[in-house]
Structure formats: structure tokens, C-alpha cells
Amino acid sequence: MTKQKVILTGDRPTGRLHIGHYVGSLRNRVAIQNDGNYDKMFVFIADAQALTDNMDNPEKVRNNVIEVALDYLACGLDPSKVTLFIQSQIPELCELSFYFMDLVTVSRLQRNPTVKTEIQMRGFETSIPVGFFTYPISQAADITAFRATTVPVGEDQKPMLEQATEIVRRFNYIYGETLTEPEILLPSNAACLRLPGTDGKAKMSKSLGNCIYLADTADEVKKKIMSMYTDPTHVHVSDPGHLEGNTVFTYLDAFSRPEHFERYWPEYAGLDELKAHYTRGGLGDMKVKKFLNAILQEELGPIRERRREFSKDIPAVYDMLRKGCEEARAVAARTMDDVRRAMRINYFEDVALIEEQSKLFAENA
Ligand code: TRP
């Protein structure tokens, strides 16, 4: 049997998705979906994981489940090709996490760099919720319950994938070859790995107010682009400009394609020529921003339009998610059967065990 290619990924529903999510992973997922080079694809809303650091704000998580679902559909994820589901509705994931907990040490979790930074960022210090501390284990369950082979995520998720791989190896070593090792799939374009905020800060984040959301109106997008951080030393048009740390150019790296030049700025053969002119001097920020705006409007317009269409029928979106949950649950349940069999905790199915023990007890009677 050749190994199946199973794609799986998810997002925490703590807010609407922005263009950082889009270039970092969403766009990639839609491309994978459309080229059809996979056997099964799952995309899910990680509400249970979002609760690990939002336990006191379940309303926020609950309300953002539908926002993320709409963002998925708006980007072009197609429920007839991809199983879309909600994490908390798959109890098998808790069951699998519980057994995985026996395979991971506290010190190994403490060394997970993503968890380390997140603990600092959230100011948990010594009062870390156990659920939050152990979410890499639950994430390993998310991945392995569906036998994912390929996990398209951002770079910050690398430690999670490493930890999941270790758990799989340890499980298979102890209980026999049962689970599938996952591989991370990162965007190939460096600008897409971590798209900076519109203010030039390293990361787009809701709390910094530097995001362009997929649901933003055309006006909002334009306003945000026009006030974007560029090169503070580029005061006069004639000044030479710098590309390093220049957010507008990072966005162009992430979004522009040769046909955009043909369509909107045929004076330049491509991005390299534009960059050369900017660096030489004599090219104003406003012109570059207008070009970026044209590109982003072209890309985001259809997404916004589809989002609006889908949001007209919210019950249909929930119906789609319900079906996705049922499908996903059936898959996770099959993996759990294999897991229980491997761990020898499938008592009622194990006819040999019951026979053997009844003989043993009869002999000793
Ligand atoms: N931790 C991921 C994030 O914050 C979300 C997530 C949860 C996930 N479980 C997953 C991603 C499994 C990929 C696979 O974005």
C-alpha cells in the first residue's frame, strides 16, 4: 500500500483572519486543494486550543468560529474537497491526548520555544494553566488522529511539528508501528513566512492594530496601505530609498506577480526594476503604495465578495461544519481503534484475551 497524502491544518478562532494568515498558509491551502495532489484534506477551527489561553473569554472563541469559517469559504476552501470541522466536536482528540501525555516529559514541554515565548507574552509566569502548557500534546493528537502526512502552517509552528513527530516515534516504538509521522509545509517565499504589520512591526497582530483583515472593506484596505510604514529616510522623492524593513516592498514581495506590472504599471518590467528605481531615488512612496493597493484590491475583492455571499446564509455554514465534524469524527474514531488495539486496551474486542484468561482462571480454580 502506498502512503496516502493527507493534508491537515487549523487556526485558533481568536479573531478574523488577516492577510498574514493568507500569504502564510491560506493561499497555499487553496492551491493544494485545487491542484488535487492529495488523498484527503482537513482544515479545522481549533476552538479547544484557543480556550487554553482564553478560558475566561469563551464568548470570544465562540463568536470567532463563524468568522474563521467564513474566511475559509471566502478564500476558496471548498467543502466538497476539504473536510472543514471544529476541534471541540471531536472527543477522540481528548482521548488521544490523554495517552500522548504519558509519552512527554514536563521538561520537554518546557523546552518548546513557541510555548516558552507565548508564556512570556501572556504573562503566565508561574501560574501557567496546565491545558495551555500541554497544548503541543493536544496539537500532536490533532495531527495524528487524522494520519496527517503534510501540515501547512507558519514557521512559528515548527516546534509543534517536531514535538508531534517525537510523540509518533515514541508511540510506534513502544506499541508498534501505528501512527503516521507528519511533515511541515512552509511557504516557499520568505516574505510570506512572517508578514510584518502595516506599521512595520515584526508581526501582524490584532492587539497591535496593524492588520489588514480579509473582511476589511476596499476603503479600509486603501487607508491602511496609504498610512503604511516605508523608509523613514526617504523624505523627498529624489532621495534614494531603502528596501530593508520597508513594509510596502515586503508586501510586494508577498503579493505581486508579473501580470500585475503589465496591468497596473507597465513602465516597469517587474519588481526588480521597480526596486532598482526606488533604491536609486526619484520614485515616491505614494506611487508604490497605489500600485500595492491595486494589487491587494484585485486579490481581496473577490474574497470579500464571497465572504458577503456566504454570510447571507449562516445556518448553511453551520450545516457544512456539522457534516465536516461527522466526517472527521469517523476518521478519528478509526485511528483510535488502531491506537487502542496497539496499546492493548481494546478489552471487549480481544476475543483471545478473554478466552486465555478464562482458561487460566479455570485451571486455577
Ligand atoms: N497552533 C496552531 C496555530 O496557532 C493551530 C493548530 C491547532 C494547528 N492544532 C493544529 C495547526 C494542528 C496545524 C495542525 O495556528
Image (cartoon, rainbow, N blue to C red):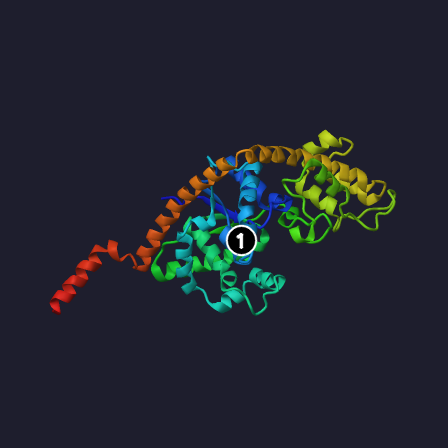
- As drawn, is 338 to the left or to the right of 142? left
Q: Residue at x 36, y 54 (%)?
A: 178
Q: Residue at x 78, y 32 (%)?
A: 267
**Relative to 295, residue 154 above or below:** below
Residue 135 screen position, x and y as percent: 50, 59
Q: Residue at x 66, y 47 (%)?
A: 191
Closer to the camera in the image, 239 or 315: 315
Residue 334 screen position, x and y as percent: 35, 48
Closer to the camera in the image, 239 or 140: 140
Name which residue type carries label 1: Pro
**Relative to 193, residue 272 above or below:** above
Which quadrant of the figure contains the N terminus? top left
Q: Dividing the picture into quarters, in which one does residue 212 lie?
A: top right
Q: Dividing the picture into quarters, in which one does residue 67 lie?
A: top right
* Residue 205 visible to an observer of this rendering: no
Closer to the camera in the image, 114 or 32: 114
SS category of the residue bearing label 1:
helix
Q: Residues within 10 Å of mark 1 (few under 14, many from 20)?
A: some
Question: Is disc 1's CB within 8 Å of ligand 1?
Answer: no
Residue 130 screen position, x and y as percent: 50, 64
* Residue 50 visible to an observer of this rendering: yes
Residue 232 screen position, x and y as percent: 82, 50
- As drawn, is 234 to the left or to the right of 299? right
Q: How many marks?
A: 1
Closer to the camera in the image, 328 or 294: 328
Which quadrant of the figure contains the C terminus? bottom left
Q: Dividing the picture into quarters, in which one does residue 264 lie?
A: top right
Residue marked by disc 1: 58
- As drawn, is 167 to the left or to the right of 246? left
**Relative to 346, residue 241 above or below:** above
